[in-house]
Amino acid sequence: MSKKRERGGFKASRHGGGKASAAGPKAAQKKAAEAREAKGAKHVVTGANRFLRGARIAPRRIDGTESVEQMIDEVFQSYNSGRLRESCQLFTNKMLAPDVTVGLTLTGALTPAGLGMSCIIPLIEAGFVDWIISTGANLYHDTHFGLGLSMHRGNPTESDVVLREEGVVRIYDIFFDYDVLLSTDAFFRQVIRGKEFQRTMSSAEFHWLCGKYLWERGRVLGLKDKSLLAAAYRCGVPIYTSSPGDSSIGMNVAALALEGGSCIIDPNKDVNETAAIVLGAKRGLGKRKAGLSAVAIMGGGSPKNFALQTEPQIQEVLGIDEKGHDYFLQVTDARPDTGGLSGATPAEAVSWGKIDPDRLPDAVVCYMDTTVALPLLTSYALAKRKPRKLKRLYDLRGPLMLQLESEFRKANS
């Protein structure tokens, strides 16, 4: 017959001899606490409990002199401020190590809100972002700024019927003239008609060419650091889009096909090139030693999946031995229980082979608006880390693809 368990329902040995526990003898613990209080004895935590090893909550007093770095490290203690602190520390302390290749994904209307100029370009130029997957819309709206066109703050409660009559387009509280769309469309049609676009290419090649023309336009107009496409062109950062036809850029490419244009963005190239980047991050290439792969996901959606599916592509489809991404950071407002990919947790991604299960502790999800989190993360990283040497992965796409093809043949011979 088994020994009767003491009241409380938990094994006493789990809590140590006489240590107060919610599962232990309540009456004795109550009397012990009252005796300590009567003596004025100080309560001492021994630190033996593994759940109480986290830093003590003792935030600094806010006095108006604190920096962003101090706010994040010393004031953001718990809930989603705590997750933002963990995100900033993961990104800065681990993901920005020299041997880590960082992929950034972008969803939501980030560039219209100015985050391309305020955050993404500084991250690119500092070598903190090595490759990007973005919605086409973010790249289209980024182009407005590269052409010197203006976006304005507005009131989201204005009548959209009146705005339409006044020729004003709205993205929530961002207003701009309808001609901004027409001028941007005209720019894309003009450059895409060029001879160098008349071929099949990956979206990275397409965006690199567009970035080249935006960089030149910015030089002529005297604009500096306005377009992330231009910055990525200068820094050799490849930018992919997971759905090339799902934006005004893709709409203009399609329109030119009706004129007889032969510009085709091939998603097969994108799938294999992104897988090659991740494999190269893990295996190393040439003089670069084997390293780690990190993904920083702003939002969710299709770009999130396109970045994470690189590992199932390598393992499941190509049959190459691999374990998954090493670092995972996501800022999202999506819930996991609805079944959408945007809210799917890194733990769930482990089951797909997207995340290395051994690195799961190095995964953080911050449930917050990206327009709040990304500026704070950018400021924190730039304050704490010196710039990294640019990896210029755009220039390495050829050798990376050869490496992928070689491993694919070995695995399937």
Image (cartoon, grey):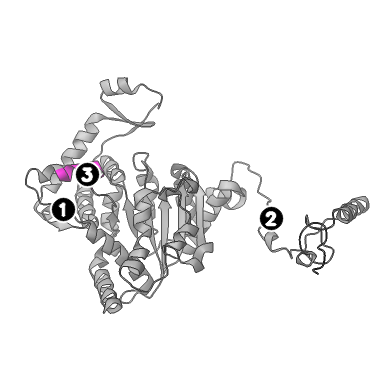
Residue at the location (39% across, 31% down)?
Answer: 173
Residue assigned mark 2? 56
Q: CA distance from mark 3 to mark 2?
A: 51 Å
Residue at the location (25% across, 66% down)?
Answer: 397
- Residue 400 location, x and y as percent? 27, 70
Q: What range of the chain is rendered magenta?
A: 245-254
Image position of 257 (left or right of 235): left
- Give SS at disc 2: loop
Residue assigned mark 1? 264
Residue assigned mark 3? 249
- Residue 294 location, x and y as percent? 42, 62
Mark 3 and mark 2 lie on one chain; the one further toward the N terminus is 2
- Residue 89 location, x and y as percent? 52, 57
Classify 10 Å Cα crowding around label 1: few (below 14), some (14-19), many (20 and above): some
Image position of 68 (left or right of 407): right
Residue at the location (51% across, 68% down)?
Answer: 358
Q: Residue furthest left?
A: 260
User: Which quadrant holds the N terminus?
Assistant: bottom right
Classify 10 Å Cα crowding around label 3: few (below 14), some (14-19), many (20 and above): many
Q: Amino acid at mark 3?
A: Ile
Nearest to the eye among marks 3 and 2: give it: 3
